[in-house]
Amino acid sequence: MTDPILFIPGILCDARIFLPQIVHLGVKHAIHIAVPGTGETVEQMAERVLAHAPARFALVGCGLGGDIALDILRRDLDRVTRVALISTDPLAEAPTNAAAREARIVAAKSGRLKEAILQEYPPEAFAQSPWRADIMALMQDMGLTLGEGVFMRQSRASQRRPDQQKTLRRAMLPVLVIAGQSDPITPVRRQDFTSALAPYGKLVVIPDAGHLPTLEQPEAVTAALEEFLNGPLMLRSVKPKPA
């Protein structure tokens, strides 16, 4: 029997960020979506997701969704069969990035949510392509639908996200890291570091993609996820990498 898949979108994203993958993978897998709209921290968001998750599941997180996925591993590793992290940084947010995020929070509070969304996902966040404008329009639509309250809670959670290096080192399960080759927000070098932390980590770099490869190169991401989900499970008796 195939595992159900729990998808967790990133900041100001809903299920549409994974739509191409959901359509394809949903043929063989039960699909669950957990949009992190409540909770003030990554830990609180992870707790809420787990409360409504299947008994055992495969996990796919993008951006903030990847941060929440890592905290789920920290809390209840035995319920997760494998995890895919897309555009995810396992380190605590750098002070300079937290300060820039604060400016976006202020903009949203001041009634300038459209501006905050554009700052969160500027054109350069995505690889140049004929559909970049369509992706940016979708980001605006998802962001405005979720609203400023969700944006501020998600932004605060990102500012306070915990360092999850130890979690990855102890993760005795298959870990797939998917990185857009041109991602300026979470560069390939950082995501290569992420995959190296996990005992069973694997990095897949998606050409001609930036921070949201699920939308920029959906077929390549879907193929990587399908291969990963069909791969073997790992024995969990292997010693984790030293902290």
Image: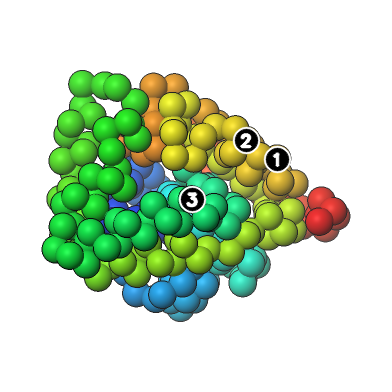
Above or below, 25 against 173 in this view is: above
- According to the picture, the residue beneath numbered tag 1 turns out to be 196
Mark 2 or mark 3, whichever is nearer to me: 3
> On the rendered structure, is 225 left or right of 20?
right
Q: Amino acid at mark 2?
A: Asp
To which quarter of the image does residue 203 belong?
top right
Above or below, 213 against 199 in this view is: above
Mark pair 2, 1: CA separation: 6 Å
Identify the residue at image location x=22%, y=62%: 108
The picture places residue 140, in percent across and down from the top left corner, at 17, 48
Asked if the residue under mark 1 is in contact with the one under mark 2, i.e. CB atoms within 8 Å, the reply is: yes
Mark 3 or mark 1, whichever is nearer to me: 3
- According to the picture, the residue beneath numbered tag 3 turns out to be 96
Q: From this viewpoint, is residue 114 visible?
A: yes
- According to the picture, the residue beneath numbered tag 2 turns out to be 192
Q: Amino acid at mark 3?
A: Thr
Q: Nearer the viewer, residue 123 or 5?
A: 123
| Label 2 crowd (10 A; few <14 / some 14-19 / many >=20) | some
| Label 1 crowd (10 A; few <14 / some 14-19 / many >=20) | some
Q: Amino acid at mark 1?
A: Ala
Which labelled disc corresponds to residue 73?
Answer: none
Q: Nearer the viewer, residue 27 or 104?
A: 104
N-terminal label among 2 and 3: 3
To which quarter of the image does residue 112 belong?
bottom left
N-terminal label among 3 and 1: 3
Identify the residue at image location x=47%, y=26%: 181
| Label 3 crowd (10 A; few <14 / some 14-19 / many >=20) | few
Asked if the residue under mark 1 is in contact with the one under mark 3, i.e. CB atoms within 8 Å, the reply is: no
Q: Secondary structure at mark 1?
A: helix
> On the rendered structure, is 212 left or right of 168?
left
Q: In the rendered picture of this protein, how many numbered marks are placed on residues?
A: 3
Quarter placement of the C terminus:
bottom right
